[in-house]
Amino acid sequence: MKYSCFIDNKMLTVHEARVSAIPYNTVWPGRQRPLDQTEEAYFISFDMTKPTTLSINVVETEIERVAIRPLEFKIPCKKEGNRLILTIEKPMNFTVEINGYHHALHVFANPKDDFTPDENTLYFGPGEHNVGLLFPKANQTVYIAEGATVYGSIYIYKQNNVTVRGRGILDSSKFLRGDEYKIDEEPRSTLKKLGVTDYDTMRASCFTAYGCKNLKVEGVIFRDAPCWTVTTRNHCENVEIDNIKIVGQWRYNSDGVDLCTTYNATLKNSFIRSFDDCIVVRAPQLDGEDGESGCENIEISNNVLWCDWGKNLELWCGKYDAYVKNITWQDNYLIHTAQYAISIDTWYGSDRITVDNIRYENIFIDTDTDPMYPIYQNDLDAPYAPNESGKNPTVAVYLGATKLGRALGNQKADESSDVSNFIVKYKNISFKNVICNNSSTLLPVELKQHNLQKFENITFSGCKLGDTIIK
């Protein structure tokens, strides 16, 4: 499927992005995912200052049905033969899906970008740029202009007052996953000189901020990350992420945004399509993080999320004593889900984990009438063959502690470990107006309870969800 697109009769550039074609996944097997599990999708990006008419011509495919997501946006659309005419009232991110969600068109309508470069700006103008691993310094701005494609990766290491912004593309397709490199190859050798451990070089992906304060990321399109796409970690503080777009994620563990041991952060107005979890608020797990820290005061609002595997909105606790508190998820739109729309989970666990004051409000879930079924790939040579036996592939809300025991690596836990002293406490968690938009497909709530976990003051109000399942 191909598209030609026009804004008020001005032709737009239609970009390609490789995405997952099927929800088929496994724990990292030491080699990358085969391309026959992927497909091409498309995106357009433009700025707007007033209501705008978008014309989409669909080439080589007859339009039989159209879905414009989020459904909650109710974007006006008129069909004229093989052309769609949409009225866009304000900046927003959405998808146009013709005859199903394969080969979708992703539309990024931005507010006007009025940035003016200065002497502290690393400026990348229209065209292609091969930068390798880019290390911005304190007080610098990295600006990727509209029409620019920067091939490389950004790593901000213990630098304050850094801004990364623009309307262009940061593309990491030329980077391998960390442990696919030899130990003396870039970027792994450079990261080791900074003190980044071998394990954590695997997390050096499209964009990483390590131990930074006063960080701003705005407007940039992130494409084809080898692992987690955008990561803040190791005690980042005062973080603002606004109107970013993540698309073209198909490789193993290509999460969207991971806010790891991060304080005072906002993530808003963004579009994320990932092949693994879309947004994760992640308690201490990575090297250099510890049980004296956690995640606190984070607001995640007005984001559009497409999850091809895993979880759309995840709060995750790992192997250290930890707290995660004062987290708000508000006005988020989950246009495709794969396993869990909302998840609060603990793997491994320590003897003290507390999750406190977590609020979900106005979460809209576009449930599919013909979903594809997520399958864990035990045999790397086996084809995708779902058993569609009436099982719903997605849970709306999951609360639990999935794996308890000493972490053995590669997502395994030593279940023979003594966990008798573990206390995993979830308290003061509210769900208000969490809505499945398809009334014929209401997704269930799943609570995994046991004597090592305590639930206190978990409330639901104004929700349209399926049954509650207690395991």
Image (tube, grey):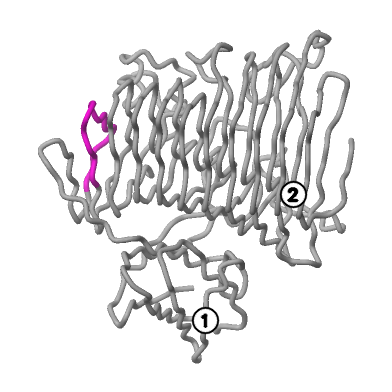
Instruction: Give the number of callouts.
Output: 2
Is there any visible trace of residue 448 in the rendered image? Answer: yes
Q: In this view, does 21 lie above or below 44?
A: above
> Three-letter amino acid code at disc 2?
Ala
Label 1: which residue? Answer: 77
Q: Residues within 10 Å of mark 1 (few under 14, many from 20)?
A: some
Q: Quadrant of residue 29?
A: top right
Q: Nearer the viewer, residue 139 or 416?
A: 139
Label 2: which residue? Answer: 396
Left or right of 168 in this view: 211? right
Left or right of 447 in this view: 225? left
Which residue is depicted at the point 30% across and 54% down? Answer: 167
> Three-letter amino acid code at disc 1?
Cys
Left or right of 269 in this view: 369? right
Residue 191 x %, y %: 34, 20
Q: In which quarter of the image is residue 241?
A: top left
Which residue is outermost to the bottom?
81
Q: Nearer the viewer, residue 198 or 421?
A: 421
Q: Residues within 10 Å of mark 2 (few under 14, many from 20)?
A: many
Magenta stretch bounds? 129-143
Q: How far apart are marks 2 and 1 (CA)?
A: 29 Å
Residue 371 x %, y %: 72, 61
Which residue is depicted at the point 43% across and 57% down? Answer: 17
Magenta: predominant secondary structure element?
A: strand
| Residue 48 belongs to magenta span | no
- Secondary structure state at the residue bearing disc 2: strand
